[in-house]
Image (tube, rainbow, N blue to C red):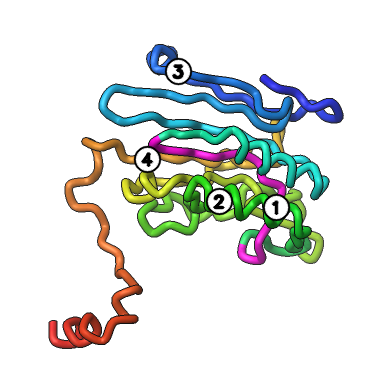
Amino acid sequence: MGRSQRTSAGTAIMVDKAIAPFITAQGTLIKGHAQFITLQPPGNGTLTIINVYAPRSSNDIAQLWQRINQADFNSDHIILGGDFNHLKVTDCKGTAGERQMHKRESASWHHMMLRYGLTDVWRLDSFQKLSKKEFTYDNGRVGATSAMSRIDKFMVSQTLEERGGRIEVAASVRKLTDHSPLLIMIWGQHNAPSNPPRFFDISLLSDEKSRQEMLEA
């Protein structure tokens, strides 16, 4: 477990002992803020899991995303998860306002997202939401001083986006943490639902022939 110099927070990746034999690489990218493991389970390609605990300084966050870029993971599948300390308008409610990215941080963030082809699982139709709870953090207050946000996230590569799965914000345990657990399940190659949900491909609307075919269907 990595531990921050300033706080007791950090990162940890724990795996079932049955999975341990498939670990081919592991390491710390930035102590207390980013670590990874790479697995090669039979018949599923290589999978790299990166756990992050983003610092609060914009410059430090930029360095974090740059370091993940520099690691140049060449895996078939990527999962990036943890506390991102960075919000969009739709990720917060109440007094937890959006934090604007500075130029350097924004550039390194988008470079990383494009480099690994990552997408926020919460925004994917291919992942079924199992709970009505949307936010992973709240300050425990009600009314005008309440603040809720979804700074804990999972990002997945396109190969896992296509498989789909389930995601859930579990009930919080206030005595232990002000964050709620965020749980993810990704379908394997052979355990996807026999009748997966079908989603509308909006790109079809951009083609005149496709629009006409849908009208005639």
How far is disc 4 from disc 1 in space, using C-alphas? 24 Å
> Which-is-in-front pick, marks 1 and 2?
2
Callout 4 amino acid: Ile
Say whether residue 170 is magenta. no
Crowd tier of the residue under label 1, counting other residues whose Cα lies within 10 Å: few below 14, some 14–19, many 20 or above: some
Q: Is mark 3 on a helix, strand or loop?
A: strand
Residue 9 lies, in percent from the top left, at 75, 29
Q: Is mark 4 on a helix, strand or loop?
A: strand
- Position of 1 relative to 127 (above/below): above
Q: Quadrant of the C terminus?
A: bottom left
Tag 2 residue: 113
Closer to the chain start, of discs 1 and 2, is 1
- Position of 103 relative to 34 (above/below): below
Tag 1 residue: 86
Tag 3 residue: 24
Q: What is the number of the mark on residue 204?
A: none
Q: Is mark 2 on a helix, strand or loop?
A: helix
Give, as a single range, the part of the protein colored magenta: 76-90
Callout 1 amino acid: His
> Which-is-in-front pick, marks 4 and 2?
2
Tag 4 residue: 186
- Position of 65 relative to 92 (above/below): above
How far is disc 3 from disc 4 in space, using C-alphas? 21 Å
Q: Do the residues labelled 1 and 2 touch (CB within 8 Å)?
A: no
How far is disc 3 from disc 1 in space, using C-alphas? 31 Å
Crowd tier of the residue under label 4, counting other residues whose Cα lies within 10 Å: few below 14, some 14–19, many 20 or above: some
Closer to the chain start, of discs 4 and 2, is 2
How far is disc 1 from disc 2 in space, using C-alphas? 14 Å
Name which quarter of the figure residue 68 lies in: top right
In the orientation shown, which residue stands out farthest toward the left?
Answer: 217
Residue 43 lies, in percent from the top left, at 26, 27
Closer to the chain start, of discs 3 and 4, is 3
